[in-house]
Amino acid sequence: MGYFVEQLTIGLSTGAIYAIIAIGFNLVFGVMNVLNLAYGATMMVGTYGLLLVWFLGVRNFWLAAIGGIVAATLVGLIVERVAVRPMKGNWWNTKVATLGFAFFVENFVTRITEGRSEPFPKPFEIVYFPVVSDIEISNVQILLVVASLVLVAAMVAFLRKTKPGKAIRIIAQSPDIAECLGIDVHRITVLGFALSAALGGIAGILNALTFGSTYPYVGQFLGLKGLVVLIVAGIGNMRGCLYVGVVLGLLESLTVGFGGSTYRDLVAYGGMTLILLIRPYGLFGEEGRVAKEI
């Protein structure tokens, strides 16, 4: 029982990271209908941005983290400018362009770092708190769960209560209708990419903090898992991403703990396939978008 509870705590923190990644994916893909395959590279840049600021002499973790988030945000804006906007809404061309940008960034960082895994600084000493019997949970795991809950609540409030958030939702239904209502589609799109990239930077930093290191291709693994959570939860549903992300993290942790690490990806991708066979729009999927007239 003690080992079971330990796996649950690990899965809860992992699931929190998956949820944050899926929320960032959802903001651009689920809400703005753009599949940004450079999102994983954006997460990776957030971790190396923090390390760069740290090595430049800023020994305050939280200030360095702001530098990492800013770096990720800048990369997200570059992706929008050079890989998304020139494609003029062509879905397949956008996917290929963002994928190519991701390969470029990952190989660039690999060349600079020689592909080494870099140790990650800690914002505080890791402390374990007793839960039941000899089971403990660390302050890092608590941070991950709290961060995911806060980010979900913040994004839901942003999309429902603020003018830019409502504009993003209108653009998701129909960019043409948004233009008729006087919404600056380009400006709102840039804002969406910036927010999504900032969330990616946060997710990358939290993941590196959990495992104590980062490496150039960490975004590939995280990006795929975030995409799985988004698809299973249903495009456009923020709270669904939280639920599915946590459940996926728990299932993966229990699978690794009791079955072996070779079955870890089977849970994610096999589960996604089964759910899509039953509910093609995901567990919490939206009804649909306004159709474009041709």
Image (tube, rainbow, N blue to C red):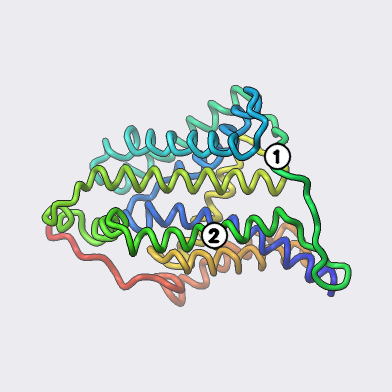
Report the residue marked by disc 1. 213
Taking 284 as reference, is 114 left or right? Answer: right
Q: Residue at (14%, 52%) from the top-left corner?
A: 182
Q: Quadrant of the N terminus?
A: bottom right
Q: Residue at (20%, 54%) from the top-left corner?
A: 175
Taking 168 as reference, is 129 left or right? Answer: right
Is residue 80 in sight in this rendering?
Answer: yes
At label 2, the amino acid type is Ala
Q: Where is residue 42 in the image (x, y as percent from the top left)?
A: 49, 40
SS at mark 2 in the image: helix
- Residue 19 is tagged as 2
Q: Residue at (21%, 59%) from the top-left corner?
A: 174
Q: Where is residue 73 in the image (x, y as percent from the top left)?
A: 44, 38
Q: Residue at (63%, 56%) from the top-left corner?
A: 144
At label 1, the amino acid type is Ser
Q: Where is residue 132 in the image (x, y as percent from the top left)?
A: 83, 73
Q: Which tag, 2 or 1, sits closer to the chain's start?
A: 2
Specify few, some or many for label 2: CA neighbours under 10 Å numbering under 14, 14-19, or 20 or more. Answer: many
SS at mark 1 in the image: strand
Q: Which of the 4 image quarters holds residue 190? A: top left
